[in-house]
Image (cartoon, helix red, strand yellow):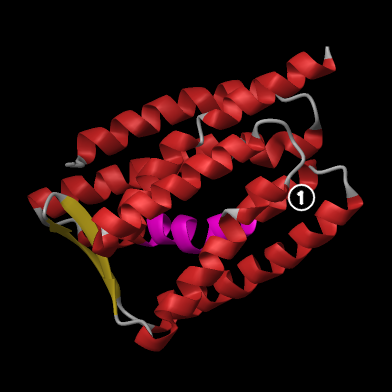
Amino acid sequence: MCFSAGASFAGSAVLVAAGYAAIRKVRKPSWKPFAAIPLLFSLQQFSEGIIWLILRSGGHETILKFSTTFFLIMALIVWPILMPLSVKLMEPSGKRRRILAVLISAGIILALYYAYCMIFYEFHPIIESHHIRYLGDWPKSLRNPAFALYILATIPPLFISGIRRMWIMGTLILISVIVSGIFFKVYLTSVWCFFAALISLVILWIIKEDKIQGD
C-alpha cells in the first residue's frame, strides 16, 4: 500500500466536508468536541500532505519543521486527551464517566511525556518505502509503555461509551491499529493516523443516528 501527498490532501478534503456536516448536525453542545474530530483530522492530514511535498522537493526547512511539529502534536498530544474527553462529555452514565475520567488522566500523562520528548529531543520525518517515517531520539525503554498507554487512552473509551454505534468506531480503530502494527510497524504514527482519520467519518453516522433517535 502506498501513500502520498495526494492521498493526504484527498483525505483532508473529504474530512473537511464530513467535519462541517457533523458540526452542523450535532444537537447537543456536549457533542461538539466529538463532532469536531473529523475536522481536526483534516488539518492533520493536510499537514502531512505538506510534509510529503517538501520531503520530495527539498528546501523549506521552516515549513517542514512546523508541519512535522503540528502533525506530531495532533498525533501524540491531542488525540490521547481529546478522544476520552470527547466521549466523557457525551456520556450520561455516572459510572462510565468515572471510568472515562481515569482514561483522560492516562491520556494527560502520556501527552505530557510526548510534549517533553518533543521539546528536549530531536525529531524529523523521512520518506521510506513509500511511507513517512517519523524519527526521534526518544527514550527507547519507554516506547512500549507509552504505546500501551496510548492504546488505553484512545480505544477503550469507544467501547465504554453507551452511545449507539460508538462500538463500531472502536472496532474499526482497533482493527486498524492491529493491521498497522503488523504490516507498517515502523510507519505506525503516519499509517495509523491515516486509517483513523478515514474511520472518523463514522462520527457523522453516529451523530445522524442520535438525531434520528431524538426526533
- Please provide the residue range marked out in magenta: 69-82
- Tally of numbered tags: 1
Residue sitting at 50 percent across and 30 percent down? 201
- Spot occupied by residue 127 in the image (x, y as percentages of width and height): 15, 57
Of 174 and 112, which appears nearest the observer?
A: 174
Which image quarter: residue 167? Answer: top right
Tag 1: amino acid: Lys
Residue sitting at 90 percent across and 52 percent down? 94
Residue 12 visible in this rendered orientation of the protein: yes
The vertical placement of 80 against 176, above or below, is below
The vertical placement of 160 against 210, above or below, is below
Please rate how many residues cluster around mark 1, counting C-alpha atoms within 10 Å: few if below 14, some from 14 to 19, many from 20.
many
- The secondary structure that dominates the magenta segment is helix
Residue that carries the numbered disc 1 in the rendered image: 88
Of 103 and 62, which appears nearest the observer?
A: 103
The extreme right residue here reads 94
The vertical placement of 201 against 55, above or below, is above
Residue sitting at 9 percent across and 49 percent down? 57
In the image, 215: left or right of 83?
right
Residue 82 visible in this rendered orientation of the protein: no
In the image, 4: left or right of 19?
left
Which image quarter: residue 32? Answer: top right
Residue sitting at 27 percent across and 43 percent down? 49
- Spot occupied by residue 25 in the image (x, y as percentages of width and height): 68, 20
Of 69 and 177, which appears nearest the observer?
A: 177
